[in-house]
Amino acid sequence: MNSITKRWLRGSMALTVLILVLAESLFLYAGRSSYYAAARQALLSRFSSISGQLKMYSGSTVAASAENRNLALHRMVEQFEDKDKIEFMLLDSEGQALTTSSGSLQAAADQEEDFWKAIDSPSGQGESIYFTGENEKVMAITLLSPYPAGDVAALRMVTSLTLVDEALAQRAWVSLGVAFVVLGFSVYSGLYFIRSIVNPLHQVERTANQIARGDLSVRLPRGGQKDEIGRLCETINRMAEELAKTEKMKNEFLSSVSHELRTPLTSIRGWVETIAALKDPRDENYQKGLSIIAAETDRLYGMVEELLDFSRLQAGIRMECQPLDLVAELTDAALFVEPRIQKAGLSLRYEEPELPLPVWADPKRLRQVFLNILDNAIKYSKPGGAITLELLQDGENVYVLFRDEGRGIDPEDLENVKLKFFKGKNAVRGSGIGLAVVDEIVTALNGSLDIDSRLGEGTTVKVVLPLYRPSAPGEK
Ligand code: ADP
Protein backbone atom coordinates (compact mmCIF):
# COMPACT_ATOMS: atom_id res chain seq x y z
CA MET A 1 0.00 0.00 0.00
CA ASN A 2 1.37 3.42 -0.86
CA SER A 3 2.31 5.78 1.88
CA ILE A 4 -0.31 8.53 1.45
CA THR A 5 -3.02 5.91 1.99
CA LYS A 6 -1.12 4.53 4.98
CA ARG A 7 -0.68 7.97 6.48
CA TRP A 8 -4.35 8.69 5.98
CA LEU A 9 -5.30 5.40 7.61
CA ARG A 10 -3.01 6.08 10.52
CA GLY A 11 -4.09 9.68 11.01
CA SER A 12 -7.60 10.35 9.90
CA MET A 13 -9.07 6.84 10.28
CA ALA A 14 -7.59 6.32 13.72
CA LEU A 15 -9.21 9.58 14.78
CA THR A 16 -12.57 8.65 13.27
CA VAL A 17 -12.54 5.27 15.02
CA LEU A 18 -11.59 6.88 18.31
CA ILE A 19 -14.38 9.45 18.01
CA LEU A 20 -16.90 6.76 17.10
CA VAL A 21 -15.87 4.57 20.05
CA LEU A 22 -16.14 7.53 22.41
CA ALA A 23 -19.52 8.62 21.02
CA GLU A 24 -20.80 5.06 21.18
CA SER A 25 -19.70 4.59 24.81
CA LEU A 26 -21.20 7.92 25.84
CA PHE A 27 -24.44 7.11 24.06
CA LEU A 28 -24.75 3.70 25.69
CA TYR A 29 -23.80 5.00 29.13
CA ALA A 30 -26.36 7.81 28.88
CA GLY A 31 -28.98 5.31 27.65
CA ARG A 32 -28.38 2.94 30.54
CA SER A 33 -28.51 5.76 33.09
CA SER A 34 -31.75 7.17 31.74
CA TYR A 35 -33.48 3.76 31.40
CA TYR A 36 -32.50 2.78 34.96
CA ALA A 37 -33.53 6.19 36.23
CA ALA A 38 -36.96 5.68 34.65
CA ALA A 39 -37.31 2.26 36.37
CA ARG A 40 -36.26 3.81 39.71
CA GLN A 41 -38.72 6.65 39.20
CA ALA A 42 -41.55 4.16 38.61
CA LEU A 43 -40.85 2.47 41.96
CA LEU A 44 -40.36 5.74 43.85
CA SER A 45 -43.64 7.23 42.60
CA ARG A 46 -45.50 4.22 43.98
CA PHE A 47 -43.72 4.60 47.33
CA SER A 48 -44.74 8.22 47.51
CA SER A 49 -48.40 7.46 46.84
CA ILE A 50 -48.30 4.72 49.51
CA SER A 51 -46.69 7.10 52.06
CA GLY A 52 -49.34 9.66 51.21
CA GLN A 53 -52.08 7.18 52.00
CA LEU A 54 -50.38 6.03 55.23
CA LYS A 55 -50.36 9.57 56.55
CA MET A 56 -54.13 9.56 56.73
CA TYR A 57 -54.35 6.55 59.02
CA SER A 58 -54.50 7.40 62.70
CA GLY A 59 -56.14 6.10 65.82
CA SER A 60 -57.04 7.17 69.36
CA THR A 61 -53.58 6.16 70.61
CA VAL A 62 -50.18 5.80 69.03
CA ALA A 63 -50.45 2.04 69.22
CA ALA A 64 -53.91 2.10 67.68
CA SER A 65 -52.78 4.21 64.73
CA ALA A 66 -49.74 1.95 64.21
CA GLU A 67 -52.05 -1.01 64.15
CA ASN A 68 -54.31 0.71 61.65
CA ARG A 69 -51.38 1.44 59.35
CA ASN A 70 -50.15 -2.13 59.69
CA LEU A 71 -53.51 -3.43 58.56
CA ALA A 72 -53.72 -0.90 55.77
CA LEU A 73 -50.27 -1.86 54.48
CA HIS A 74 -51.16 -5.56 54.44
CA ARG A 75 -54.26 -4.68 52.48
CA MET A 76 -52.31 -2.59 50.02
CA VAL A 77 -49.94 -5.50 49.39
CA GLU A 78 -52.84 -7.84 48.77
CA GLN A 79 -54.60 -5.46 46.45
CA PHE A 80 -51.44 -4.17 44.75
CA GLU A 81 -52.39 -3.37 41.16
CA ASP A 82 -49.07 -3.70 39.41
CA LYS A 83 -48.36 -7.18 40.73
CA ASP A 84 -47.26 -8.45 37.32
CA LYS A 85 -44.58 -5.79 36.93
CA ILE A 86 -43.54 -5.02 40.48
CA GLU A 87 -43.24 -7.11 43.56
CA PHE A 88 -44.31 -5.15 46.66
CA MET A 89 -43.39 -6.51 50.07
CA LEU A 90 -43.33 -5.55 53.70
CA LEU A 91 -40.22 -6.22 55.79
CA ASP A 92 -39.75 -6.60 59.52
CA SER A 93 -36.94 -4.97 61.46
CA GLU A 94 -34.58 -7.82 60.45
CA GLY A 95 -35.23 -7.29 56.76
CA GLN A 96 -37.32 -10.48 56.55
CA ALA A 97 -40.39 -10.43 54.35
CA LEU A 98 -43.72 -10.41 56.23
CA THR A 99 -45.88 -10.50 53.15
CA THR A 100 -45.43 -10.00 49.43
CA SER A 101 -47.64 -9.20 46.48
CA SER A 102 -46.43 -12.30 44.60
CA GLY A 103 -47.59 -14.50 47.42
CA SER A 104 -44.40 -16.58 47.53
CA LEU A 105 -42.43 -15.63 50.59
CA GLN A 106 -39.59 -17.97 49.67
CA ALA A 107 -38.29 -16.00 46.78
CA ALA A 108 -38.83 -12.69 48.50
CA ALA A 109 -35.97 -10.80 50.04
CA ASP A 110 -33.27 -13.12 48.69
CA GLN A 111 -30.96 -10.17 48.90
CA GLU A 112 -31.10 -7.69 51.70
CA GLU A 113 -28.51 -5.20 50.67
CA ASP A 114 -31.02 -2.43 49.89
CA PHE A 115 -32.66 -2.94 53.29
CA TRP A 116 -29.38 -2.40 55.17
CA LYS A 117 -28.57 0.56 52.93
CA ALA A 118 -31.92 2.07 53.85
CA ILE A 119 -31.18 1.54 57.55
CA ASP A 120 -27.84 3.32 57.17
CA SER A 121 -29.12 6.12 54.95
CA PRO A 122 -30.42 9.33 56.54
CA SER A 123 -33.23 9.41 53.95
CA GLY A 124 -34.31 5.90 54.92
CA GLN A 125 -34.07 4.70 51.37
CA GLY A 126 -31.75 2.07 49.88
CA GLU A 127 -31.35 0.61 46.44
CA SER A 128 -29.61 -2.42 44.95
CA ILE A 129 -29.40 -4.08 41.58
CA TYR A 130 -28.65 -7.81 41.59
CA PHE A 131 -29.32 -11.17 40.02
CA THR A 132 -31.96 -13.34 41.61
CA GLY A 133 -31.68 -17.08 42.17
CA GLU A 134 -33.28 -17.56 38.73
CA ASN A 135 -30.57 -15.38 37.24
CA GLU A 136 -32.90 -12.51 36.58
CA LYS A 137 -31.58 -9.01 36.94
CA VAL A 138 -33.73 -6.91 39.23
CA MET A 139 -33.78 -3.49 40.85
CA ALA A 140 -34.90 -3.37 44.49
CA ILE A 141 -35.69 -0.30 46.57
CA THR A 142 -36.41 -0.37 50.27
CA LEU A 143 -38.04 2.53 52.08
CA LEU A 144 -38.19 2.50 55.85
CA SER A 145 -41.78 2.99 56.87
CA PRO A 146 -42.28 6.72 57.36
CA TYR A 147 -44.76 6.10 60.22
CA PRO A 148 -44.78 3.44 62.92
CA ALA A 149 -46.80 0.51 61.57
CA GLY A 150 -46.54 -2.35 64.03
CA ASP A 151 -44.15 -5.14 62.94
CA VAL A 152 -43.73 -3.56 59.47
CA ALA A 153 -40.38 -1.78 59.50
CA ALA A 154 -39.90 -1.19 55.81
CA LEU A 155 -41.55 -1.36 52.42
CA ARG A 156 -39.73 -2.91 49.50
CA MET A 157 -40.39 -2.98 45.80
CA VAL A 158 -38.58 -5.14 43.29
CA THR A 159 -38.88 -4.92 39.54
CA SER A 160 -37.29 -6.94 36.79
CA LEU A 161 -34.74 -5.19 34.60
CA THR A 162 -34.96 -7.81 31.82
CA LEU A 163 -37.13 -5.68 29.55
CA VAL A 164 -35.05 -2.60 30.26
CA ASP A 165 -31.86 -4.49 29.45
CA GLU A 166 -33.40 -5.85 26.27
CA ALA A 167 -34.33 -2.35 25.17
CA LEU A 168 -30.79 -1.23 26.01
CA ALA A 169 -29.26 -4.07 24.01
CA GLN A 170 -31.44 -3.20 21.05
CA ARG A 171 -30.32 0.38 21.32
CA ALA A 172 -26.69 -0.77 21.44
CA TRP A 173 -27.08 -2.88 18.29
CA VAL A 174 -28.75 -0.09 16.37
CA SER A 175 -26.12 2.43 17.39
CA LEU A 176 -23.31 -0.03 16.58
CA GLY A 177 -24.86 -0.48 13.16
CA VAL A 178 -24.98 3.27 12.66
CA ALA A 179 -21.34 3.54 13.76
CA PHE A 180 -20.30 0.88 11.23
CA VAL A 181 -22.23 2.59 8.46
CA VAL A 182 -20.51 5.89 9.33
CA LEU A 183 -17.12 4.18 9.46
CA GLY A 184 -17.74 2.36 6.18
CA PHE A 185 -18.85 5.53 4.50
CA SER A 186 -15.85 7.49 5.70
CA VAL A 187 -13.44 4.71 4.62
CA TYR A 188 -15.10 4.53 1.21
CA SER A 189 -15.19 8.28 0.64
CA GLY A 190 -11.65 8.67 2.01
CA LEU A 191 -10.27 5.93 -0.25
CA TYR A 192 -12.11 7.37 -3.21
CA PHE A 193 -10.65 10.80 -2.48
CA ILE A 194 -7.14 9.47 -1.90
CA ARG A 195 -7.28 7.43 -5.08
CA SER A 196 -8.23 10.53 -7.00
CA ILE A 197 -4.93 12.03 -5.80
CA VAL A 198 -2.67 9.01 -5.74
CA ASN A 199 -3.52 7.63 -9.20
CA PRO A 200 -2.79 10.84 -11.10
CA LEU A 201 0.35 11.27 -8.97
CA HIS A 202 1.56 7.84 -10.11
CA GLN A 203 1.05 8.92 -13.66
CA VAL A 204 2.93 12.18 -13.01
CA GLU A 205 5.76 10.17 -11.45
CA ARG A 206 5.98 7.82 -14.45
CA THR A 207 5.96 10.71 -16.90
CA ALA A 208 8.53 12.70 -14.93
CA ASN A 209 10.77 9.61 -14.89
CA GLN A 210 10.42 9.28 -18.64
CA ILE A 211 11.35 12.94 -19.04
CA ALA A 212 14.31 12.45 -16.71
CA ARG A 213 15.48 9.59 -18.94
CA GLY A 214 15.45 12.00 -21.86
CA ASP A 215 12.17 11.21 -23.57
CA LEU A 216 10.93 14.76 -24.06
CA SER A 217 7.99 13.82 -26.27
CA VAL A 218 5.81 12.38 -23.46
CA ARG A 219 2.93 14.47 -22.17
CA LEU A 220 0.43 13.99 -19.38
CA PRO A 221 -3.21 13.81 -20.48
CA ARG A 222 -4.94 17.12 -19.99
CA GLY A 223 -7.72 16.24 -17.53
CA GLY A 224 -10.58 18.69 -17.28
CA GLN A 225 -9.74 19.38 -13.63
CA LYS A 226 -8.38 22.78 -12.75
CA ASP A 227 -7.24 21.71 -9.29
CA GLU A 228 -3.71 21.40 -7.92
CA ILE A 229 -3.15 18.08 -9.71
CA GLY A 230 -4.43 19.49 -13.00
CA ARG A 231 -2.10 22.45 -12.59
CA LEU A 232 0.82 20.15 -11.72
CA CYS A 233 0.17 18.17 -14.92
CA GLU A 234 0.09 21.36 -16.94
CA THR A 235 3.33 22.56 -15.34
CA ILE A 236 5.06 19.26 -16.09
CA ASN A 237 3.86 19.39 -19.69
CA ARG A 238 5.11 22.95 -19.97
CA MET A 239 8.44 21.90 -18.46
CA ALA A 240 8.76 19.09 -21.03
CA GLU A 241 7.90 21.51 -23.83
CA GLU A 242 10.48 24.03 -22.65
CA LEU A 243 13.11 21.32 -22.26
CA ALA A 244 12.36 20.04 -25.75
CA LYS A 245 12.56 23.58 -27.11
CA THR A 246 15.89 24.24 -25.39
CA GLU A 247 17.20 20.88 -26.51
CA LYS A 248 16.26 21.65 -30.11
CA MET A 249 17.80 25.11 -29.95
CA LYS A 250 20.94 23.72 -28.34
CA ASN A 251 21.36 21.20 -31.14
CA GLU A 252 20.81 23.91 -33.71
CA PHE A 253 23.32 26.07 -31.88
CA LEU A 254 25.94 23.35 -31.90
CA SER A 255 25.45 22.60 -35.57
CA SER A 256 25.44 26.28 -36.52
CA VAL A 257 28.55 26.95 -34.43
CA SER A 258 30.42 24.05 -35.95
CA HIS A 259 29.30 25.13 -39.36
CA GLU A 260 30.38 28.70 -38.74
CA LEU A 261 33.72 27.58 -37.31
CA ARG A 262 34.37 25.58 -40.41
CA THR A 263 34.05 28.52 -42.87
CA PRO A 264 36.91 30.67 -41.44
CA LEU A 265 39.01 27.56 -40.83
CA THR A 266 38.62 26.51 -44.47
CA SER A 267 39.53 29.98 -45.61
CA ILE A 268 42.57 30.12 -43.30
CA ARG A 269 43.78 26.76 -44.48
CA GLY A 270 43.37 27.76 -48.13
CA TRP A 271 45.33 30.96 -47.65
CA VAL A 272 48.04 29.28 -45.62
CA GLU A 273 48.55 26.85 -48.50
CA THR A 274 48.59 29.72 -50.99
CA ILE A 275 51.14 31.69 -48.96
CA ALA A 276 53.29 28.62 -48.46
CA ALA A 277 53.45 28.25 -52.24
CA LEU A 278 54.44 31.90 -52.68
CA LYS A 279 58.10 32.54 -52.20
CA ASP A 280 58.02 36.34 -52.24
CA PRO A 281 56.54 38.15 -49.25
CA ARG A 282 56.07 41.21 -51.42
CA ASP A 283 53.61 39.38 -53.59
CA GLU A 284 50.19 41.04 -53.56
CA ASN A 285 48.45 37.77 -52.69
CA TYR A 286 50.86 37.19 -49.83
CA GLN A 287 49.71 40.38 -48.11
CA LYS A 288 46.05 39.80 -48.96
CA GLY A 289 46.29 36.29 -47.61
CA LEU A 290 47.78 37.51 -44.36
CA SER A 291 45.07 40.12 -43.85
CA ILE A 292 42.33 37.59 -44.61
CA ILE A 293 43.90 35.16 -42.16
CA ALA A 294 43.98 37.95 -39.56
CA ALA A 295 40.30 38.83 -40.20
CA GLU A 296 39.19 35.19 -40.07
CA THR A 297 41.14 34.68 -36.87
CA ASP A 298 39.23 37.62 -35.39
CA ARG A 299 35.96 36.01 -36.44
CA LEU A 300 37.04 32.76 -34.81
CA TYR A 301 37.97 34.68 -31.71
CA GLY A 302 34.51 36.24 -31.60
CA MET A 303 32.87 32.87 -31.97
CA VAL A 304 34.92 31.39 -29.18
CA GLU A 305 33.86 34.35 -27.01
CA GLU A 306 30.26 33.49 -27.79
CA LEU A 307 30.87 29.88 -26.81
CA LEU A 308 32.33 31.12 -23.56
CA ASP A 309 29.23 33.26 -23.05
CA PHE A 310 27.21 30.14 -23.57
CA SER A 311 29.09 28.17 -20.97
CA ARG A 312 28.87 31.10 -18.53
CA LEU A 313 25.16 31.29 -19.12
CA GLN A 314 24.85 27.59 -18.32
CA ALA A 315 26.84 27.99 -15.13
CA GLY A 316 25.04 31.18 -14.07
CA ILE A 317 26.72 34.53 -14.53
CA ARG A 318 28.84 35.69 -11.61
CA MET A 319 28.89 39.40 -10.83
CA GLU A 320 31.38 41.62 -9.14
CA CYS A 321 29.33 44.73 -8.57
CA GLN A 322 30.39 48.23 -7.61
CA PRO A 323 28.94 51.72 -7.96
CA LEU A 324 29.37 52.86 -11.60
CA ASP A 325 28.52 55.85 -13.73
CA LEU A 326 26.22 54.47 -16.41
CA VAL A 327 26.90 57.48 -18.66
CA ALA A 328 30.62 56.79 -18.72
CA GLU A 329 30.07 53.06 -19.38
CA LEU A 330 27.67 53.72 -22.26
CA THR A 331 29.98 56.33 -23.79
CA ASP A 332 32.81 53.85 -23.58
CA ALA A 333 30.85 51.17 -25.38
CA ALA A 334 29.67 53.68 -28.01
CA LEU A 335 33.25 54.74 -28.71
CA PHE A 336 34.27 51.11 -28.98
CA VAL A 337 31.68 50.25 -31.65
CA GLU A 338 31.82 53.56 -33.51
CA PRO A 339 34.38 52.37 -36.10
CA ARG A 340 32.17 49.36 -36.89
CA ILE A 341 29.13 51.57 -37.16
CA GLN A 342 30.88 53.82 -39.64
CA LYS A 343 32.24 50.89 -41.56
CA ALA A 344 28.71 49.55 -41.95
CA GLY A 345 27.62 52.90 -43.41
CA LEU A 346 25.52 53.79 -40.37
CA SER A 347 25.47 56.86 -38.18
CA LEU A 348 25.48 56.98 -34.39
CA ARG A 349 23.30 59.50 -32.55
CA TYR A 350 24.19 59.89 -28.95
CA GLU A 351 23.94 62.94 -26.73
CA GLU A 352 25.92 62.23 -23.65
CA PRO A 353 24.04 63.47 -20.55
CA GLU A 354 25.98 65.94 -18.46
CA LEU A 355 25.22 64.48 -15.06
CA PRO A 356 26.45 61.04 -14.10
CA LEU A 357 23.86 58.29 -13.51
CA PRO A 358 25.07 55.98 -10.78
CA VAL A 359 24.12 52.29 -10.87
CA TRP A 360 25.25 49.25 -8.92
CA ALA A 361 26.75 46.82 -11.45
CA ASP A 362 29.66 44.76 -12.70
CA PRO A 363 31.50 46.92 -15.31
CA LYS A 364 32.52 43.96 -17.50
CA ARG A 365 29.00 42.53 -17.61
CA LEU A 366 27.46 45.94 -18.26
CA ARG A 367 29.78 46.42 -21.19
CA GLN A 368 28.77 43.00 -22.48
CA VAL A 369 25.10 44.08 -22.29
CA PHE A 370 25.75 47.23 -24.31
CA LEU A 371 27.98 45.53 -26.87
CA ASN A 372 25.58 42.64 -27.47
CA ILE A 373 22.68 45.03 -28.08
CA LEU A 374 24.78 47.34 -30.26
CA ASP A 375 26.11 44.36 -32.19
CA ASN A 376 22.55 43.34 -33.06
CA ALA A 377 21.65 46.92 -33.99
CA ILE A 378 24.59 47.04 -36.42
CA LYS A 379 23.96 43.55 -37.76
CA TYR A 380 20.30 44.15 -38.55
CA SER A 381 20.57 47.74 -39.92
CA LYS A 382 20.73 48.77 -43.58
CA PRO A 383 23.50 51.14 -44.69
CA GLY A 384 22.36 54.75 -44.31
CA GLY A 385 20.36 54.01 -41.17
CA ALA A 386 20.99 55.52 -37.76
CA ILE A 387 21.51 53.99 -34.36
CA THR A 388 20.28 56.22 -31.55
CA LEU A 389 21.30 55.90 -27.91
CA GLU A 390 19.32 57.64 -25.22
CA LEU A 391 19.69 57.78 -21.44
CA LEU A 392 16.74 58.74 -19.23
CA GLN A 393 15.96 58.54 -15.55
CA ASP A 394 12.92 59.05 -13.32
CA GLY A 395 14.51 59.22 -9.87
CA GLU A 396 14.00 55.45 -9.37
CA ASN A 397 15.40 53.84 -12.48
CA VAL A 398 17.71 54.55 -15.37
CA TYR A 399 16.52 53.74 -18.89
CA VAL A 400 19.00 53.04 -21.68
CA LEU A 401 17.35 53.05 -25.12
CA PHE A 402 19.02 51.59 -28.21
CA ARG A 403 17.03 52.44 -31.33
CA ASP A 404 17.86 51.18 -34.81
CA GLU A 405 16.18 51.61 -38.16
CA GLY A 406 16.90 48.11 -39.33
CA ARG A 407 14.76 45.27 -40.53
CA GLY A 408 12.92 44.76 -37.26
CA ILE A 409 11.76 41.52 -35.64
CA ASP A 410 8.78 39.45 -36.75
CA PRO A 411 5.99 39.84 -34.12
CA GLU A 412 5.88 36.05 -33.83
CA ASP A 413 9.57 35.98 -32.87
CA LEU A 414 9.45 38.94 -30.52
CA GLU A 415 8.50 36.98 -27.39
CA ASN A 416 11.26 34.43 -28.03
CA VAL A 417 14.25 36.58 -28.83
CA LYS A 418 15.35 36.62 -25.19
CA LEU A 419 15.53 32.81 -25.12
CA LYS A 420 18.81 30.97 -25.30
CA PHE A 421 19.75 29.81 -28.83
CA PHE A 422 16.74 31.49 -30.39
CA LYS A 423 17.38 32.93 -33.81
CA GLY A 424 14.72 34.92 -35.55
CA LYS A 425 13.56 34.43 -39.13
CA ASN A 426 15.55 37.54 -40.04
CA ALA A 427 18.74 36.31 -38.33
CA VAL A 428 21.97 36.80 -40.22
CA ARG A 429 24.76 35.27 -38.24
CA GLY A 430 25.16 34.57 -34.58
CA SER A 431 24.23 31.77 -32.26
CA GLY A 432 21.12 33.21 -30.66
CA ILE A 433 22.48 33.72 -27.18
CA GLY A 434 23.34 37.45 -27.25
CA LEU A 435 20.01 38.67 -25.87
CA ALA A 436 19.71 35.69 -23.52
CA VAL A 437 22.98 36.76 -21.89
CA VAL A 438 21.78 40.39 -21.79
CA ASP A 439 18.53 39.37 -20.13
CA GLU A 440 20.31 37.20 -17.59
CA ILE A 441 22.72 39.98 -16.61
CA VAL A 442 20.07 42.72 -16.45
CA THR A 443 17.79 40.52 -14.33
CA ALA A 444 20.67 39.72 -11.98
CA LEU A 445 21.14 43.49 -11.56
CA ASN A 446 17.46 43.85 -10.52
CA GLY A 447 16.65 45.47 -13.83
CA SER A 448 14.65 44.47 -16.87
CA LEU A 449 14.96 44.20 -20.64
CA ASP A 450 12.17 45.33 -23.00
CA ILE A 451 12.22 44.90 -26.75
CA ASP A 452 9.88 46.71 -29.05
CA SER A 453 10.10 46.20 -32.77
CA ARG A 454 8.26 46.80 -36.02
CA LEU A 455 9.04 44.68 -39.01
CA GLY A 456 10.78 46.79 -41.66
CA GLU A 457 10.91 49.90 -39.44
CA GLY A 458 13.36 49.17 -36.68
CA THR A 459 13.86 47.94 -33.16
CA THR A 460 14.10 49.62 -29.76
CA VAL A 461 15.79 47.77 -26.95
CA LYS A 462 15.25 49.23 -23.49
CA VAL A 463 17.43 48.32 -20.53
CA VAL A 464 16.05 49.39 -17.17
CA LEU A 465 18.35 49.45 -14.13
CA PRO A 466 17.67 50.77 -10.63
CA LEU A 467 19.43 54.05 -9.81
CA TYR A 468 22.09 53.52 -7.19
CA ARG A 469 21.60 55.23 -3.87
CA PRO A 470 24.21 54.38 -1.25
CA SER A 471 21.56 53.24 1.25
CA ALA A 472 19.40 51.54 -1.36
CA PRO A 473 18.44 47.95 -0.56
CA GLY A 474 19.80 46.76 -3.94
CA GLU A 475 23.31 47.25 -2.64
CA LYS A 476 25.04 44.23 -1.29
P1 ADP B 1 22.62 36.54 -31.67
O1 ADP B 1 23.60 36.34 -30.57
O2 ADP B 1 22.61 35.42 -32.66
O3 ADP B 1 22.64 37.87 -32.29
P2 ADP B 1 20.42 37.40 -30.07
O4 ADP B 1 19.96 36.65 -28.88
O5 ADP B 1 21.20 38.63 -29.86
O6 ADP B 1 21.18 36.37 -30.99
O7 ADP B 1 19.15 37.75 -30.93
C1 ADP B 1 18.17 36.78 -31.19
C2 ADP B 1 17.38 37.11 -32.41
O8 ADP B 1 16.69 38.33 -32.22
C3 ADP B 1 18.23 37.33 -33.62
O9 ADP B 1 18.46 36.11 -34.30
C4 ADP B 1 17.38 38.27 -34.44
O10 ADP B 1 16.45 37.54 -35.19
C5 ADP B 1 16.61 39.06 -33.43
N1 ADP B 1 17.16 40.43 -33.17
C6 ADP B 1 17.88 40.82 -32.11
N2 ADP B 1 18.15 42.15 -32.17
C7 ADP B 1 17.61 42.60 -33.30
C8 ADP B 1 17.57 43.89 -33.96
N3 ADP B 1 18.14 44.97 -33.42
N4 ADP B 1 16.88 43.97 -35.11
C9 ADP B 1 16.30 42.92 -35.65
N5 ADP B 1 16.32 41.66 -35.12
C10 ADP B 1 16.97 41.50 -33.95
Image: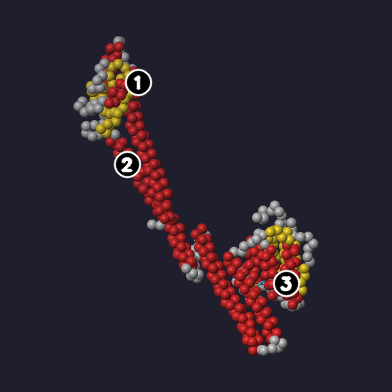
Taking the spot 69% from the left edge, 66% from the top edge, the residue there is 367
Report which residue position mark 1 lands on: 122
Q: Which mark is residue 170?
A: 2
Q: Quadrant of residue 92?
A: top left
Mark 1 Cα shell of 10 Å, populated few (<14), some (14-19), many (≥20): few
| Residue 295 versus residue 241 in the image, above or below | below
Q: Circle 3 — which element?
A: helix
Report which residue position mark 3 lands on: 337
Mark 2 Cα shell of 10 Å, populated few (<14), some (14-19), many (≥20): few
Separation of marks 3 and 1 at Cα, in angstroms: 115 Å
Q: Which of the two discs, 3 and 1, labels the residue nearer the N terminus? A: 1
Quarter occupied by the C terminus: bottom right
Q: What type is the residue that disc 1 sits on?
A: Pro
Residue 98 vs residue 262, the one in the foreground: 262
Separation of marks 1 and 2 at Cα, in angstroms: 38 Å
Q: Position of residue 450 (x, y in %)?
A: 67, 65
